[in-house]
Image: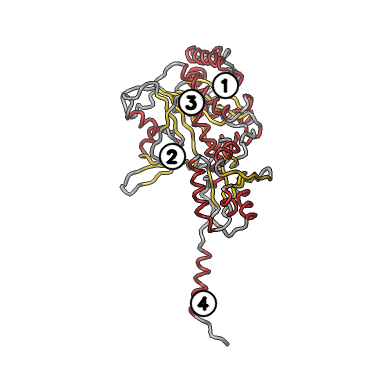
Amino acid sequence: MTRENPEKKAIFLRKIDLAEKKLSTANYKGTRDFYPEDMQLRNWMFEIMKKVVISYGYREYDGPILESLDIYKAKSGQEIVDKQLYDFIDKGERHVAIRPEMTPTLARMVAGRARDLPRPIRWFSLPNLWRYEAPGHGRLREHWQLNVDIFGVNSVNAEIEIISLACDILFAFNAPKDSFRVKFSHRGILSSFLRNTLSLLPEKEEAVAKILDKKNKVTQEEFESSLLDLLPNPTDQLKLIDQYLNSNIDTVLQISGIPEEPVIYIQEFYDKIKILGISESVEFDPSIIRGFDYYTGFIFEIFDTNKQNKRSLYGGGRYDNLIGLFSNEELSGIGFGLGDVTLENFLKTHNLIPEFNRDSSVYLTLMNNALFSDILLLARELRREGIDTEINLDGNQKLGKQISIAEKKGYRYLLVLGEDEIKDNNVILKDLKESNQKIISKNQLMIDLKLVLGI
């Protein structure tokens, strides 16, 4: 019987132990890993959104991902503060939170320079946001959100610009006019209906409003049942609610308790929006609620019309005195937030995402390691001319293998510079899509290559 080697046994056991302790490759629930192809899509989306917003004269800002918890207690809704914040005590014993939204940071920053900023103030940002909530379709714990806001304009002209911009973002992705609907209302109409028409106590207004907001997501029986305990006179009040939800921009004033001022405001908005040629995509909807304790005037949401993704894409509205917590100066604003998750779902549903390729860049082969210096110099010349160039770094690989790698990476064009080409001052350009090639004089390479690449 052979004697067991204690040292070998110890090494064997350590290997088993290490294997059992391997960390999971799964990402944190509610987040995403962005592999290169995912980053290509994300960057494409962000670049188009930014281009549209900047074309309207908006300037980009950003702020810290950490803020004092107090700022969210004062500026965010109760549900966010109580249930959705990622908050902790830092090493300096300060209670901080990872930002769940950008508005509190925006309020703080605008208040800090309110007297020095020329009006109107047009700002936008694309921050990374975190909320602890159940992940689902169009909703994750971590996402990016385009925030667009304009301050210092108290007329309906600001609403026109915001809606025009919001629609132009989707049009920039080639979205058809019938692929989405803009539904708008006014907080003054909703509040008056709840308070004056239904005679609700203040503490019940928000609860009833949230049920109205979910009207189209439940059955009529479920809808009415959820309201019974909140209405002092359900029989008559359910009829009023039905009248309210089925009203339009011309009939809403027929409901008792609705004031003229907010109705005239939205009528002016609707008349002016017709000039832009998008009125067929815009409609009054009294069930639009938005943040009950946040918005004070015009409110809107944009919905996907496709049945496979029939949901709200994004929305916003007007709010008064955004900076009141930080300053005595009053400043009204209007804005919206568009999340990257809902936008991506919309684009996928309507087949609006293009095929990403590297048709405007080249892959440079290395025929043997002795030619590496020549390859480096050629790549440097190409990059200086604005041509993105990736080099193969293994001169021992056969050309067929290098071509296979280039194809897998999405390259269409491949350059070959071997000993014969160097001797004759030529370069071979291969079109992997068309399966052809041509010899180009090195002196003519940059000109011909730019024509081929469309640069």
Q: Amino acid at mark 3?
A: Ser
Residue denoted by label 3: 55
Residue denoted by label 1: 285
SS of the residue under disc 3: helix
Q: How many neighbours does mark 3 have within 10 angstroms: few (below 14), some (14-19), or many (20 or more)?
A: few
- Which quarter of the figure is the N terminus placed in? bottom right
Q: Are marks 4 and 2 in contact (CB under 8 Å)?
A: no
Q: Residue 254, located in which quarter of the rendered image?
A: top right
Quick one: which residue is furthest to the bottom in this view?
A: 1
Mark nearer the viewer, 3 or 4: 3
Front residue of 147/257: it is 147
Give me the C-alpha separation between circle 4 and circle 2: 53 Å
Mark nearer the viewer, 1 or 3: 3
First of labels 4, 2 by sequence position: 4
SS of the residue under disc 2: helix
Q: Is residue 52 visible?
A: yes
Give me the C-alpha separation between circle 3 and circle 4: 69 Å
Q: Are marks 2 and 1 in contact (CB under 8 Å)?
A: no
Q: Are marks 3 and 4 in contact (CB under 8 Å)?
A: no
Q: Is residue 203 visible?
A: no
First of labels 3, 4 by sequence position: 4
Residue denoted by label 2: 82
Give me the C-alpha separation between circle 1 and circle 4: 74 Å
Mark nearer the viewer, 2 or 3: 3
Q: How many neighbours does mark 1 have within 10 angstroms: few (below 14), some (14-19), or many (20 or more)?
A: many
First of labels 2, 3 by sequence position: 3
First of labels 1, 3 by sequence position: 3
Q: Are marks 1 and 4 in contact (CB under 8 Å)?
A: no
Residue denoted by label 4: 9
Give me the C-alpha separation between circle 2 and circle 1: 30 Å
